[in-house]
Amino acid sequence: MKLQRKNGLRAAALGALVVSGTLVLSACGSDDNSGGTSGSGETTSAASDIKCDGATGKLLASGSSAQKNAMDLWVKNYMAACTGVEVNYKSSSSGEGIVAFNQGTVGFAGSDSALKPDEVEESKKICKGGQGINLPMVGGPIAIGYNVPGVDKLNLDAATIAKIFNGKIKNWNDPAIAELNKDAELPDKAIQAFHRSEDSGTTQNLGKYLGATAKADWPYEAEKKWPAPGGQAASGSSGVAAQVKQNEGAIGYFELSYATSQSIPTVSIATGAAAPVDATSENASKAIAAAKVKGTGKDLALELDYATKAEGAYPMVLVTYEVVCDTGNKPETLDTVKSFLTYAAGDEGQKVLSDHGYAPIPAEINAKVRETVAGLK
């Protein structure tokens, strides 16, 4: 029941971060702070279920770029409702977010992968009397975006995706791709495969999918660091998406919102179901709905079935966690952390996800998230 003592590390570099543009926050402050509230602790009609509940001051957070667009929306709505509160989320990577959390420089971190045992152990130094826990907050498909003029529909299976990203398939008219796309006019053009340059939970989740479904062609451990030879690197989901958008013959992986916002076509995955499955929020929800909680105590880390062949279930999914202390949160930010995450996990916060390429967390699991947030100390 102890509250964490003030940490001398204030991370001035993070202080400049606020809201940037679509889902997670980036580097500029929210300009819309006029939600019609009469003071901190009150709510607006536009964001009817936001309860500020003593929230005040500045809350720093960082991590996953996968949830950037969702986080941007949440922060904008939250800061409009809670005057006098500033939430700054730095969209970087899951790995950087967890490092910042375990250094005590942020109130919470976003990560596309649950904390590993050594990261949990390290968190105990910051979470005095407690430890870091995983709260699933954002779900959605990892889209495979491509730039092949004249090819508006592209089907791939796990083995072909693996061979493209490890450099074994080098051309767009390769027989393996042609076999899955008999009606497409595939060009004799080199493939440019882009991956994340920094440690990334999105990379790790892609690796989990390929490891579960194409082990013979993807013999690598599912880690946050890109494991395969070849390819080209770009920073963040936004960087990979930008490279795909700009380069003919390119292919890359990123959250669906990045494809949607930039009109990048995405691959449909042949899973063994009756028809290839499109990357949509609805189809991702079908896969995430089968997730089971594998964490213990207050930890709500999930186990996903990447090898599902269920009809209409898009298997290449990720769940982004907000990492917090179960006990030992900073007293100066605890109320704000609880207030903000309560909104994000609430009906209003989850509702905005579907319209922006994300999948809400299943209701049964989400109820446990709200209960856990309410009990943070």
Image (cartoon, grey):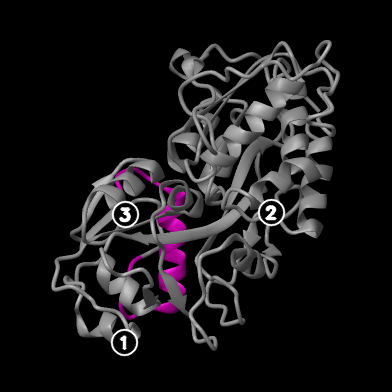
In the image, which is nearer the foreground, mark 1 or mark 3? 1
Q: Which residue is under mark 2? A: 360
Q: Is residue 218 visible?
A: no
Q: Is residue 343 above or below residue 200?
A: above
Depth check, front residue: 169 or 221:
169
Which residue in the structure is indicated by mark 1?
182
The residue identified by callout 3 is 226
Badge 2 or badge 3: first in the primary sequence: 3
Q: Which image quadrant for residue 50?
A: top right
Residue kind at label 1, given as amino acid type? Lys
Residue 212 in picture, x, y percent from top left: 46, 75
Question: Real-space Cα distance between discs 2 and 1?
Answer: 35 Å
- Residue segment shown in magenta: 196-220
Near-viewer residue (151 or 194): 151
- Location of the N terminus by quadrant is top right
The residue at 48%/28% (across/down) is: 26
Instruction: Tell whether 343 sits left or right of 214.
Output: right
Quarter-wise, where is residue 155 in the image? bottom left
Q: Which mark is residue 83?
A: none
239 up-or-down from 108: above or below: below
Compare marks 1 and 3 and give the one earlier in the sequence.
Answer: 1
Pick whichever, 341 or 204, lies toward us.
341
